[in-house]
Image (cartoon, rainbow, N blue to C red):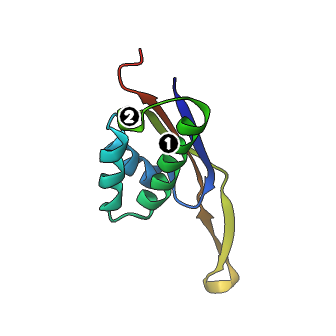
Amino acid sequence: MESRAVSRYARVSSRKARLVVDLVRGRPVEEALAVLEYTPKKAARLISKVVKSAIANAEDTQNVDVDKLYIKRAFVNDGPLAWRWRPRAHGRATGIRKRTSHITIVVDERGAD
């Protein structure tokens, strides 16, 4: 039985977060957490939290063996943009896009199919 966790409005661009999600997709959760621990990206810390939440959701809602869990699906979607303005020369202003993303992790028990 699969279980999922979602982090919405994470303050990291989805393009940067997808680089980290690609590292852990399809791996067992223990191995995925080890990879995320030593990945020097801000998104790795955020994705690690979501993986731990998905594991906790699986433990609470289903009677599963945590050692058999693996990351079945992992994806990152764009969130809303927050616009900030920066003053420029000659009285102009330039927009700065503060990007957000929605991180979704789905874990399942290996051999449950």
Circle 2 residues within 10 Å: few <14, some 14–19, many ≥20: many
Point out the image quarter for the C terminus.
top left
Cα distance between the residues tagged 2 and 1: 9 Å
Q: Position of residue 107 (x, y in %)?
A: 46, 34
Residue hosting label 2: 70
- Say whether residue 94 is left or right of residue 108: right
Q: Earlier in the sequence, mark 2 or mark 1?
A: 1
Label 1 belongs to which residue?
Answer: 55
Amino acid bearing label 2 = Tyr
Query: CB under 8 Å between callouts 2 and 1?
Result: no
Occupied quadrant, residue 111? top left
Amino acid under disc 1:
Ile
Badge 1: few (under 14), some or many (20 or more) residues near its Cα, within 10 Å? Answer: many
| Nearer to us in this view, 91 or 17 | 17
Q: Residue at coordinates 45% horizontally, 61% vertically from top-left?
A: 45
The answer to which quarter of the image holds residue 77 is top right
Secondary structure of the residue carrying tag 1 is: helix
Query: Does 110 appear above or below 29?
Result: above
Apparent side of residue 79 relative to residue 112 in the rendered image (left or right):
right
Q: Nearer the viewer, residue 33 or 23?
A: 33
Percent position (x, y) of residue 98?
A: 60, 64
Query: Residue 89 in the image: x percent, y percent?
Result: 61, 85
